[in-house]
Image (cartoon, grey):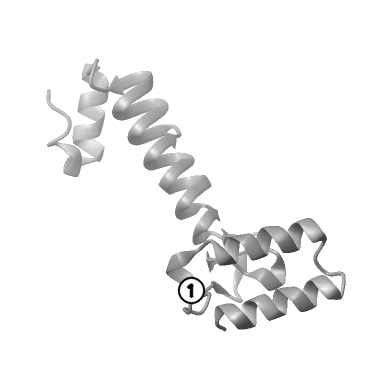
Amino acid sequence: MNMTQELERLGKLHANGQLSDDEFAKAKSLLLSAPALSGVPLRSIRRQSSHTVFGLPVWAIAIGPDMERGEMRGHARAIFALGDMATGWFAFGALARVGLLVALGGGAIGGIAIGGGAVGAIAIGGGACGYYALGGAAVGIHTVSGLQQDSEAVSFFHHYFPWLRGLVHP
């Protein structure tokens, strides 16, 4: 679908009352203000497995806007979730949250959180907050940062994250 077709579709949704004036104006503005998308079809991906565990799909991918669903960005919810926003046991995305086991993204919240901003039991990032935290600015019980290198944290990261040895010096 090209930009003209998308504008026509938005206009029809607005005319049918499926989009309010504010929603229509916001969607139209967003569409017209994206120079990289002009003349290029809007792409979005929405896929998920048919198998579920504890009521969650095993995997899901949600990337890009989906105007028909009223979503400006994709939100994947699954055990293995990949999306603009991702919620799952293993969450990977610009915002990855509730990664009970692993969250990886620009902003990551989870058991093991790795990202620009990371919050978790084990947090690794530019800004990290956790029981074990490693980052430029690290806050926690055992931390490795530009200001402090707790010996237990150094030992922990050396043992469990050996690929970080270049960042963690005893």
Q: Is residue 106 visible?
A: yes
Front-lying residue, 159 or 164: 164
Q: Is residue 55 visible?
A: no
Measuring from the top left, give residue 79's x and y in whole percent.
54, 59
Q: Where is the C terminus found, in terms of image quarters?
A: top left
Residue located at (14% from left, 36% from top):
165
- Looking at the image, residue 47 lies above or below residue 96: below
Measuring from the top left, give residue 96's x and y in whole percent.
49, 48
Front-lying residue, 123 or 51: 123
Q: Which residue is mark 1?
A: 38
Front-lying residue, 149 or 46: 46
Residue 74 lies in quadrant = bottom right
Residue located at (79% from left, 74% from top):
13
Left or right of 54 on screen, residue 80: left
Q: How many marks?
A: 1
Farthest residue to the right: give it: 17
- Looking at the image, residue 31 lies above or below residue 110: below
- Looking at the image, residue 91 lies above or below residue 41: above
Per the image, label 1 sits on a secondary structure element best described as loop
10 Å neighbourhood of mark 1: few (<14), some, or many (≥20)? Answer: some
Measuring from the top left, give residue 80's x and y in whole percent.
49, 61
Amino acid on which the number 1 mark rests in the picture? Ser
Left or right of 29 on screen, residue 149: left
Front-lying residue, 73 or 42: 42
Residue located at (19% from left, 34% from top):
158
Residue located at (51% from left, 57% from top):
84
Q: Where is the N terminus found, in terms of image quarters?
A: bottom right
Measuring from the top left, give residue 2's x and y in whole percent.
55, 82
